[in-house]
Image (cartoon, rainbow, N blue to C red):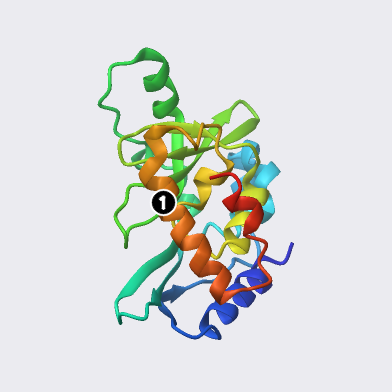
Amino acid sequence: MDYQKEFNEMLNSLKACPNVTVTEEDFFVKEEIIPSFFKKYKHLKIIEEEIKVLNDNKIVWGYTQASGNTLPMGETHLISIEKIISTKSKLEVRIRNSEAEEILAELLPFDDHPNAGDGIMGCLRWMNDQYEIWLCDAHLNCFKMNFGLSEYLKKLIELKAMYGWQYLFAELDIKSDAFKVIRKELKNRLTILHKCFPNLPVDSYLKKL
């Protein structure tokens, strides 16, 4: 997948949409990774192409409503691979639940929202030479996602990095009362997304809510 092309097309589609403002844009995909990197981190070879996108890349956008107010609509900050694999990227664990604490201690954030400050993070969890993708929220609740990094990036592009999109693909009961506020926000943003991009098949996502 040509990630530079796909993300450029996503940005261009946002900029072409009336009432949409891209407030932050800094996106550059690495052309290659030096071979010595994979000699040191052999387990990362399985996400070689995706690593090129993990380059401190950032996109933030909003939608101006009829009232004149701008609704924050989406954001991605794809943290650099160098920072991801450093010990400083580990989550600070404050809970005392052994199972949850074990999972949290292994999560490495790779996608967060410094502009919104909502605490939502996409995280990697490595187990030997395999990995999982997890969604982590501001309260350090963690939910496994049902795909790998390549599919994560594809869905991020498809849904224009819309806030909360990860909840649509996480292993959780989105219709439970615990996610009532999140459902409302997702419905609102998906409706706006459909206004901006009529060909985007948001109905299948709305049915999940």
Amino acid under disc 1: Lys
**Which type of secondary structure does the marked residue at label 1 adopt?**
helix
Name the image quarter holding the N terminus. bottom right
**Looking at the image, which residue sits at the far top?**
98
Up the image or down, 25 lies above or below 38; here it is below
**Residue at 56%, 86% in the rendered image:** 16
Q: Is residue 36 visible?
A: no
Image spot of residue 25 (x, y percent):
44, 75
Image spot of residue 149 (x, y percent):
62, 47
**Looking at the image, which residue sits at the far right?**
1
**Residue at 66%, 46% in the rendered image:** 47
Image spot of residue 120 (x, y percent):
39, 47
Say which of 199 and 28 sits in front: 199
Up the image or down, 5 lies above or below 89; here it is below
Dividing the picture into quadrants, the one containing residue 200 is bottom right
Say which of 128 and 202 sits in front: 202
Up the image or down, 60 lies above or below 108; here it is below
Say which of 35 and 71 sits in front: 71
Task: Give the residue pinned by disc 1.
Answer: 184
